[in-house]
Image: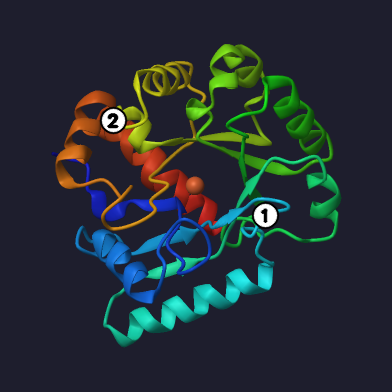
Amino acid sequence: MSFSPATFIDIHTHVLPGMDDGPKNLEESAALIRCYTDMGIRQVIASPHYIQGTAWAPSSLSVLDQVAVLQSFLQSQNIAMTIFPGMEIACHKKMGEHLLLNKFLPLGTSSWYLLEPSFTDGADAFFSCLEPLLEQGYSIILAHPERIPALWLAGDALKSLVGQKLRIQLNIGSLLGKFGKESRKAGMELMAANCVYYLASDSHGALNRRPPVQEEWETLEKELGADLLEKLCCLHPAQLLAE
Ligand SMILES: [Fe+2]
């Protein structure tokens, strides 16, 4: 195996304690982080859910606070991991308005926002959320479109928007078939069309929806090749953190 998982930088994770459907407390967060450090991985972006009108709509300050709390807990446990702040922002009608009010955190120090399409809305609602943001000049990373049924049928419209201001992040689990055949097929189609910029785990815990294990990395390397895996999992995320 020539790909080294140790250089993976996970840009989409739910590692912060008590913020969403990720870890419930610091111990569970540390157990999840150990899944990374056991493989030599040293950097992740925490991207807790932000879903407007629900209990999962944290302020930027509370995310930054939790990053600091987890970071110092990990240090106390001698776990070497750097956690960068972020959010996974669910598409909603007032998103443009809220972006103007600085309600959201981009990923790391970049100006890129991680946008989650609705699992239940139709494609029209999605594009009417996304397109104004792109027109206003925001930089958007779209989280796991391959998991969204409405976007399976609107793949061409989505592909036509990918470019300087829109990048696509696929879930590694989708390519491994963990979210069903349709998600894997949609993900592979986006890969074949050269529309994917990042692969991320979207990890939620050490036991459930954990980061990839060694055998899974080997499967991915066989399927995609080491160079492409390196680009989507390591090089592009490193560039994002340097932006
Ligand atoms: Fe997520």
Residue 126 drawn at (x, y percent):
70, 28
In the displayed structure image, the side of residue 153 where residue 15 appears, left or right:
left
Instruction: Name above or below for residue 116 compared with residue 211.
Output: above
Secondary structure under tag 2 reads loop
Which residue does the image show at 43% across and 76% down from the upper left?
Answer: 70
Tag 1: amino acid: Thr
Of badges 2 and 1, the one in the foreground is 1
Which residue does the image show at 68% across and 36% down from the upper left?
Answer: 165
Instruction: Name the quarter where the C terminus is drawn.
Output: bottom right
Instruction: Name the quarter where the N terminus is drawn.
Output: top left
Instruction: Name above or below for residue 178 compared with residue 201.
Output: above
Label 2: how many Cα within 10 Å (few below 14, some 14–19, many 20+): some
- Mark 2 near ligand 1 (CB under 8 Å)? no
Instruction: Say the numbered circle drawn on residue 176.
Output: 2
Q: Nearer the viewer, residue 88 or 159?
A: 88
Residue 179 drawn at (x, y percent):
37, 30
Tag 2: amino acid: Leu
Residue 73 drawn at (x, y percent):
38, 82
Secondary structure under tag 1 reads loop
Which residue does the image show at 31% across and 62% down from the upper left?
Answer: 32
In the displayed structure image, the side of residue 57 where residue 199 appears, left or right:
left
Instruction: Say the numbered circle drawn on residue 26.
Output: none
- Mark 1 near ligand 1 (CB under 8 Å)? no
Instruction: Name above or below for residue 37 compared with residue 156.
Output: below
Q: Which residue is mark 1?
A: 54
